Amino acid sequence: MNSFLEISEEIPCQCGSGKKYGDCCKNKRFKIGTKDDDLVKETTIDEEVMKTLEEIKKIFFEDYGINPGENDFVAWNIPIYNHDMLLENVYLFRELGFQENHIYAYYKSDGLLPCDINTDLLSQSDIEEFESLCKEYDELLNEELEGHINSIQYVINSDTYINEQVEYALEAIISSLNDLIRRHSGTNSIREYKITTEADYCIFSALKTVRTLQSINKLRETHLPECIYALSRGIFENYMYICNINMDSSLFKDKILPKVDEVNYTFDLHPDGRINYNKVINRKTKIKTPIRIIISNLKDNLPYDEIDPSLIASLIAIILATLLLSKISQNREIQTQYTNDVLYLCKNLSYKFINCLEIAKCDEEHTNEIFDLLLDRLKEQF
Ligand SMILES: [Zn+2]
């Protein structure tokens, strides 16, 4: 086996910067050279990395009963780096409060992130690429407005604005629904809830909506727009029911009350006695029916090419919740004072939502007839 031979300082650097090796990556913590006719990058391993490698070796031995050989992957137990992971990291970095221009450069460079501990290990051209992407972001964000807005300005500002409105509205609607539940009911447990009057049904809808909005808030953090849409369909159904009940109370007595009684159906149980929320069982016939939510086509969120789709999904869900809240408050069995409070809140929110929808409509990715329907509904109702 031949020993390592560093390349000449005079030849162009292998990192692709176009400079001579001597003026480029020569002074890094790695050396470029040849070994057995192969071009290699050689580096020293510090104590911390050595310790990690020893740990990985131990896990390998525990899993396979032998020590890793020359052709085994060093980090075989780490997930394969791909676009999904890149996106997950973008959202993680945002939560950690990284500078947005660094996150942008990380995303656009497909995973570069120079920092104090790794700059010495990255080639000069990688560092230059990262820096120029940071600069690109800053320039795009600060570009003068001349009758147009570039996509970075549009996406970043829209995301920030819509996110603020969504957060504010979520909190306001949840506390208003909780207020209704406190005023009109002694329980906030969905399972113990008995429905005998229209008001009971309204409060039941309020309880469900609070839970749904709380779940949507969690899904928003994990960026699952399709799941948020699935949950907002539930809010929309509630809204339609309350609209119909408000117009014709016989609907409640004839159609809804028989459905929500617990005489005919109950949840199935797991063998260990826990409730199985995936199956309902007919008490008389004992026939079990599976309940499934099928989530298909989970779409990639492209953080710099369009407004965050989970934000748009949350916005739609919250607008539906606002419409529902207003309809609940207008039911004939609900206290007048509550109705007045809610109408004031909903009117206030609807102005903000109209702005958000107008902004979202500009994004080609989100051109959607739902926006127009919601805009009409908000304008006519409030
Ligand atoms: Zn170089």
Image (spheres, rainbow, N blue to C red):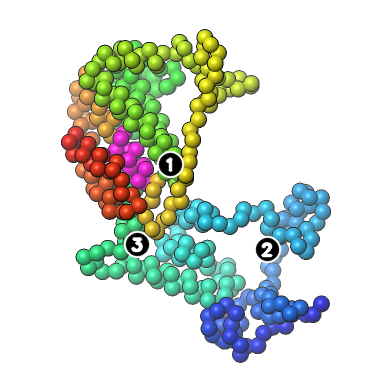
The image quarter containing residue 194 is: top left
The answer to whether residue 266 is magenta is no
The span from disc 1 to disc 3 (Cα, nearest Å) is 24 Å
Direction from residue 237 to residue 301 in the image, left or right = right
Foreground residue, 286 or 322? 286
Tell me, yes or no, if residue 210 can be seen here.
no
The answer to whether residue 317 is magenta is yes
Foreground residue, 1 or 172? 1
Q: Residue at x 67, y 62 (%)?
A: 48
Q: Earlier in the sequence, mark 1 or mark 3?
A: 3
Q: Earlier in the sequence, mark 1 or mark 2?
A: 2
Task: Tell me the residue that label 2 is attached to.
Answer: 49
Q: Amino acid at mark 2?
A: Val
Q: Secondary structure at mark 3?
A: helix
Magenta range: 311-321
Question: Which secondary structure type mostly characterizes the magenta part of the structure?
Answer: helix
The span from disc 3 to disc 2 (Cα, nearest Å) is 38 Å
Task: Tell me the residue that label 1 is attached to.
Answer: 226
Task: Give coordinates of residue 245: x percent, y percent.
Answer: 26, 20
Task: Give coordinates of residue 149: x percent, y percent.
Answer: 27, 63
